[in-house]
Image (cartoon, grey):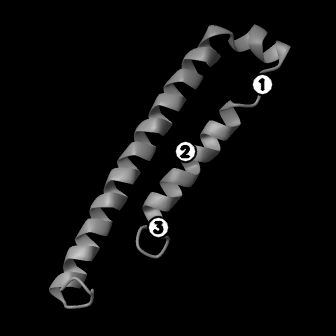
Amino acid sequence: MLDQSPLAVGIVAAALGGAAALTIPETQRENQLMGEARENLIERAQTGAQDVVEKVQKVTEEAGEAAGKEARYQGLSPES
């Protein structure tokens, strides 16, 4: 998959890294300074990360379907 869609893999890795970073518990000082703004940021980031993951999954599925169709067209699969 990395060879076929390096950008998609990079986007998924970045989204997962961001989501992992957001799971780290906040400190008391951070809570004092950021409070509700942090919560809003976390919610927006999680929603954005989920959207990216869903889009990448869709693109990956479509690419796989297109590759399978082309393989059949070229006579490279047993189904052709």
Q: Earlier in the sequence, mark 3 or mark 2?
A: 3
Which residue is labeled 1 in the image?
A: 25
Q: Identify which amino acid the numbered label 2 is placed on.
A: Ala
View extreme (front): residue: 79
Q: CA distance from mark 3 to mark 1?
A: 31 Å
Q: Which mark is residue 15?
A: 2
Q: Which mark is residue 16?
A: none
Q: Nearer the viewer, residue 58 or 27?
A: 58
Label 1: element kind:
loop
Q: Identify which amino acid the numbered label 1 is placed on.
A: Pro
From the top left corner, tell me how far across and down residue 38 is, in percent: 64, 18
Label 2: element kind:
helix
Q: CA distance from mark 3 to mark 2?
A: 14 Å
Which residue is labeled 3 in the image?
A: 6
Q: Quadrant of the C terminus?
A: bottom left
What residue appears at the point 59 percent right and 45 percent down from the top-left corner?
Answer: 16
